[in-house]
Amino acid sequence: MPARLILIGFCLLLGACAAPWQRDDGRFGPWPGEGVEFRGQGPLSAFPPVTGEELLQPIEGARYSRRQIIRIDEGDVLADPMTIDELMQYALNHHPLLRVYQQDIEIAKARRVGAGVRPNPDVVFDSDHNVDDDTFDFGLRLDIRILTAGKIWHREQVAAAGVTRARLALNRDTKLLLSRIGGAAVDVLYYKQLAQLYQRLGQLTTKAAAWQKIRVDNKDDRALDGFVLQADAAEIKQERLKALRRLKAAQMILARAIGVADPRPVEVEGRLVEEWLPDISLEAVLNEVRFTGPELAAQHAAIEECRAREGLEYANAIPDMEIGPRFSRRFTGRQGSEGMRIRIPWAVSDRNQGPILESEAARLRAEAMLDAVNLETLGSVAVAYAELAPLRTQLEDYTKNVKPLLDQTEQDVHKAIDNKTVVPSDLNAPIRRLVRLRLDHLQARYRYAQLHMRLVAAAPSAITARREAGGSE
């Protein structure tokens, strides 16, 4: 009898340890972030451990909680022009994709809850009726599965790595979303200034064409000369209408980019950026991208998750064991028996070879993808950096040498038309060159604004520190 009690008590204790425990909120399993810490090796070791209540915090600037989306009534904030910073903040508060990305983290946390839960024990009841002597046998068996090779720890490592990957993927996707918003805002500013420039140049060409028409009507000039200036004026008007059409489309694209549920045009405050980036080395920019870029960090997290999963598959190759007491008794007599059952699978042919090879291939693929992401990310930043310096030189030369000449030429053309001191056909070439140079300059400013935003998004800390330090090498 004592031996029986000891055996049954030992098995029940194992069953209690294997069963999930109930929390004080009525649910089962560990609290999210409780007792599990991702101890990965490699580049992610510089990141803080994924543990505790910090997992439950939303990203900075976002207006949603862990379980409920908080929509703040900001009124019709889109009625007035918004700066680029205000547009990005609006997207952080309202864009549905950010809520999708946040729920990816919640999914990873839910998997983490289940990772530490041990399998339930099985209680088996057996009954047998012997028809020859009309006797009944009753049996009771408790089967408890004992996980070997640290499978629970490996599962927790995989789940914790999945939470880290989801969080860094959120940072990566948020940066991508904000970059698209910045690009869409720059497009709106460009088309707005392009329409304004065409309106200004159209006034000049229309004025010259009207004077030319008077001279043609008075037989002072040929009709062909009048057609050239009138065609130029009509062409500039068409280009202005085209710019206005593209402006409306760009405003709607921007509204979609920031997450406006009710589509409407969005006005952008300001003009194309005229602030120069500080003098900063390419290596300083690339170093920040390497060590803090969300694209590379997310891929490093994917590699760590693959490594953790590979370790789990190696652990799954070790068979688990089942243990439990057995008791049987015959109803019509005092005969009975008790014992213990231990089951250990014999891994003769199936040693989990397929999942092990698959997890290893997935890890190698993730490492190769890291090289591809590194090549694409650093390459695009380097291209933008290489183009930015010559473009700045071009813009500075225009401001210093070309712009004064164009301003003076435009004033001279207006005076010549008002005073009628020149033949209108002689103004055709200067006006065309004036239009071309003005448009080329606006195109250069548009390109500089795009590159400026790309580099600021890639290395904000290095550029800010350089600007505060004075911007000199």
Image: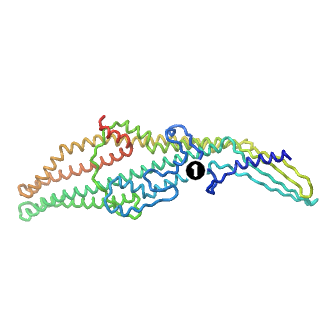
Residue 85 screen position, x and y as percent: 35, 52
Residue pictured at 20% horizontal, 49% vertical: 437
Color encoding of the figure: rainbow
Whether residue 416 is visible, yes or no, is yes
Using the image as rendered, state which of residue 28 and residue 412 is in the foreground: 28
| 454 sits left or right of 8 in the view | left
Amino acid at circle 1? Pro
Residue depicted at 36% across the width and 37% down the height: 282
Residue 223 falls in image quadrant? bottom left
Relative side of 144 to 212, left or right: right
**Camera-side residue of 354 and 316:** 316
Q: Quadrant of the C terminus?
A: top left
Q: Measured from the top left, where is residue 126 in percent x and y? A: 82, 56
Residue occupying the point 67% across, 40% down: 149
Q: Which residue is mark 1?
A: 32
Furthest toward the top, the residue is 473
Q: Position of residue 246 (x, y in %)?
A: 31, 59
Q: Nearer the viewer, residue 101 or 408?
A: 101
Q: Residue at x 32, y 37 (%)?
A: 469
Q: From the viewer's perspective, tell me whether residue 247 is left or right of residue 370.
A: left
Q: Is residue 370 above or below residue 439?
A: above
Q: Name the element at disc 1.
A: loop
Count of marks overlaid on the render = 1
Q: Is residue 90 above or below residue 144?
A: below
Quarter of the figure with residue 255: bottom left
- Asked if residue 228 shows in the view, the reply is no
